[in-house]
Image: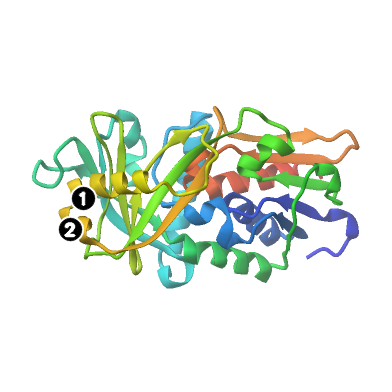
Amino acid sequence: MSSEPNDEIIVVGGGVIGLTTAVVLAERGRRVRVWTRDPVERTTSSVAGALWWPYRIEPVARARKWALRSLDVYEELAGRPEVTGVRMVEGVLGEAGPDDAWAADRLPGLRPATAEEYAGTGLWARLPLIDMAVHLPWLRERFLGAGGAIEVRTVSAFAEADAPVVVNCTGLGARELVPDASVRPVRGQLVVVENPGIRTWLVSTDAAGAMAYFFPQPGRLLLGGTADEDDFSTEPDPAVAGAIVRRCAALRPEIAGARVLDHRVGLRPARDTVRLERELLPDGRLLVHNYGHGGAGITVAWGCAEEAAGAVSERL
C-alpha cells in the first residue's frame, strides 16, 4: 500500500454503501479513511431487513448491472454465513410483476408460487438474506484489515475532509451536506419477534397497498413494514407496530403469538435516481458521489462500490 501523503481518500458515511466502497478502495491499494457520524451498529443500514432483490430503481440499466455484480459477491459470501452474515434463503415475492423477474436467468429455481403456498400471484426465489448485525461489523473488520481507518465524526462541509479525493456516501445526510433537497426520507418501521419456526421469507402487498414482509434471521424474525415518504420520525409508533404484526400474522398465523423483542425505525435515503458521479470541488479536489439508493442499498452496494472506485481511479 502506498505511503504517499497525497494519495489518501476520505469516504464520508459508514453505512453499507460507505463501508463497501471503502473496502473496495482499500483492497485496491488505496489509503482510505472513513468518516462516519455513527458507529456501524447505529447507522440506517443496521435497521435494514436486508433482502437482495432486483428492485427497479433509476438509472435502470446501471442499477441492474450494480445489482447483478452485488449478487455475485453475496453468493460467494454466503459460503461463510456465520462470518459474513450472508445466507441464501428461499422465499416468495408476492404480487410479482414482469419487472421483478428481469434477473430470472441468474436466479435458479425461480418459479410461480401455487395457490396453496401463497394466496395471490407470487414468485419463489432463493436470494441473499443478510444479517446486518453480523455483516456490518464484518465489513468494518475487512476494511480495517486492508489497512483502512475509521473516525467517528460529524461532517458539516466537504472542505473539512483533508484529502485530495472525497467519496460522498452519506445517504440521507446528503440532503444537508451537498446540499441536495431531492434526497428524502422514506420511513420504515420493523418489529423484531422470536421466530416461531419460520424458515422462509415473504414480501407481500395487499389490495390497499400496505406492505407485509417477514425475514428469518438467526434467533429472530423481522416483521415489516412501512414506506412513509418525507417522514423524518425515528420513534417507533405502537399503532403501526400492531398493524405490522397483524398483517404478517394474516400470512402466517403463528406470528400472532410470537414474543416481541424489539422495535426499529430506519429512514431510507430515497432519490429519483441514484447519484453516482464525479464532481470537481472549487479547490480542485475530486468529489465522488455515491448516494440516493433508497431501500436498494444492499442490492446494489458492491456494484456501486466498484463503479465509485473506478471513478476515483480515473482521476489519476
CA separation, marks 1 and 2? 7 Å
- Choose between 69 and 118: the one closer to the eye: 118
Q: Which mark is residue 249?
A: 1
- The residue under the point 32% across, 39% down is 211
Q: Quadrant of residue 95?
A: top left
Whether residue 247 sits left or right of residue 83 in the image: it is: left
What is the quadrant of the N terminus in the image?
bottom right
- In the rendering, at what x and y percent does residue 151 appear? 74, 62
Q: Which mark is residue 143?
A: none
Q: Earlier in the sequence, mark 1 or mark 2?
A: 1
- Contact (Cβ within 8 Å) of mark 1 with mark 2: yes
- The residue under the point 10% across, 41% down is 115
Instruction: Identify the element where label 2 is drawn.
Output: helix
Instruction: Identify the element where label 1 is drawn.
Output: helix
Looking at the picture, which amino acid does disc 1 mark?
Ala
- In the rendering, at what x and y percent does residue 257 appear? 21, 60
Whether residue 50 sits left or right of residue 303 in the image: it is: left
Whether residue 298 sits left or right of residue 309 in the image: it is: left
- Choose between 85 and 72: the one closer to the eye: 85
Q: Which mark is residue 254?
A: 2
- Choose between 81 and 204: the one closer to the eye: 204
Extreme front residue here? 238
Q: Is residue 55 above or below residue 1?
A: above
Examine the rendering and report whether any part of residue 110 can be seen.
no
Mark 2: few/some/many CA within 10 Å (<14, 14-19, 20+): some
Q: Is residue 72 above or below residue 101?
A: below
- The residue under the point 28% across, 64% down is 259
Looking at the picture, which amino acid does disc 2 mark?
Glu
Q: Is residue 106 above or below residue 262?
A: above
- In the rendering, at what x and y percent does residue 132 appear? 47, 60
